[in-house]
Image (tube, rainbow, N blue to C red):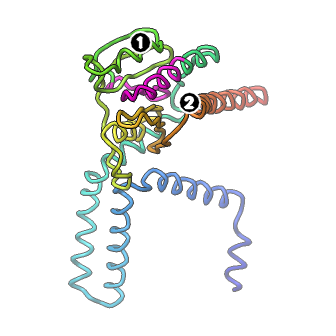
Amino acid sequence: MQQLIELLRNIGVKDIADMAIVAFVFYKLYMLIRETRAEQLIKGILVLLIATQLSDWLQLHVINWILRNTMTVGLIALLIVFQPELRRALEYIGRTKFLTKSIVDIQDEEIRVTVEEIIEAVGSLSRQKIGALIVIERDTGLNEVVETGTPINGKISRGLLINIFMPNTPLHDGAVVVRKTEILAAGCLLPLTENQSISKELGTRHRAAIGITERSDSLVVIVSEETGAISLAENGMLKRFLDIGTLKVLIMDSFKSKENKQWQFLRMKWRHKEDE
């Protein structure tokens, strides 16, 4: 008890900050791997670590030797097995505001016009039960996805979006990528999610929408071809059965939150300069 009291007395502000940073990093790592195959792999690694320690305490030398060598070789295997998760983590770090300049520099009026055109097109497609997949680029560039489709490079409009997704047209099968006020390409191919916990009811269109939002910070609007139901994918999560009003609010809030974060960062930077 005396040692604990002495330890607490020696903890300073730097120690508390150190522990808080470590806790925050571990929390972010957990959020990145949550509900992915990496979560199950980490559980398996923890079991191996516990078994290795127990075999050492119980002096089970053969088992301990096997487990220790397995863990040594396993470090190399982890880099291969965790490749998608490591890439996702690095992309997440690369999207932070202190490492990159925001791509979303549209003015409020341009954002409103863009969202209005998308909303009107989605409403029409939903009523006609025409499937659609609209990817809205934000900070993370999607040139790799754009290259898989047919270049459009046209100003966004409800008429153009509706015509692209009309059945039996050359570009209806695939995703449309939107950057600022422009449709970059149509008929684009998106990576499917590897998340095994999502509903089996979801088809390829919804799985592709989740997949691209797992690899970027884009927003994806989905219209179901079977039911006309509207969904929105963001950060690997899917919000289903939305009405037009709710969809508009969600998209606008997503853009506003990005702008607010950028403004707060610039304001803090400006105050720091004034203090100097």
Q: Identify which residue, 31 or 220, lies in the foreground.
A: 220
Quarter of image, res 176: top left
* Image location (x, y in percent) of residue 92: 46, 40
Query: In the picture provided, is 142 more to the left or to the right than 72?
Result: right
Question: In the image, what residue type sits under mark 1?
Answer: Leu
Residue at point 61% right, 18% down? 112
Residue topped by disc 2: 244
Residue at point 25% right, 20% down? 168
The N terminus lies in quadrant: bottom right
Is 139 contained in the magenta span?
A: yes
Query: Is 246 placed above or below 158 here?
Result: below
Residue at point 52% right, 20% down? 120
Question: In the image, what residue type sits under mark 2?
Answer: Ile
* Image location (x, y in percent) of residue 143: 35, 23
Q: Residues within 10 Å of mark 1 (few under 14, many from 20)?
A: some
Residue topped by disc 1: 160
Considering only order in the chain, which callout, 1 or 2, is on the residue closer to the N terminus?
A: 1
* Image location (x, y in percent) of residue 23: 57, 58
Query: In the picture provided, is 65 more to the left or to the right than 235?
Result: left
Q: What residue span does the magenta drawing correspond to? A: 117-145
Q: Which mark is residue 104?
A: none
Is 159 contained in the magenta span?
A: no
* Image location (x, y in percent) of residue 195: 35, 51
Q: Secondary structure at mark 2?
A: helix
Q: CA distance from mark 2 to mark 1?
A: 19 Å
Q: Disc 2 or disc 1, which is closer to the eye?
A: 2
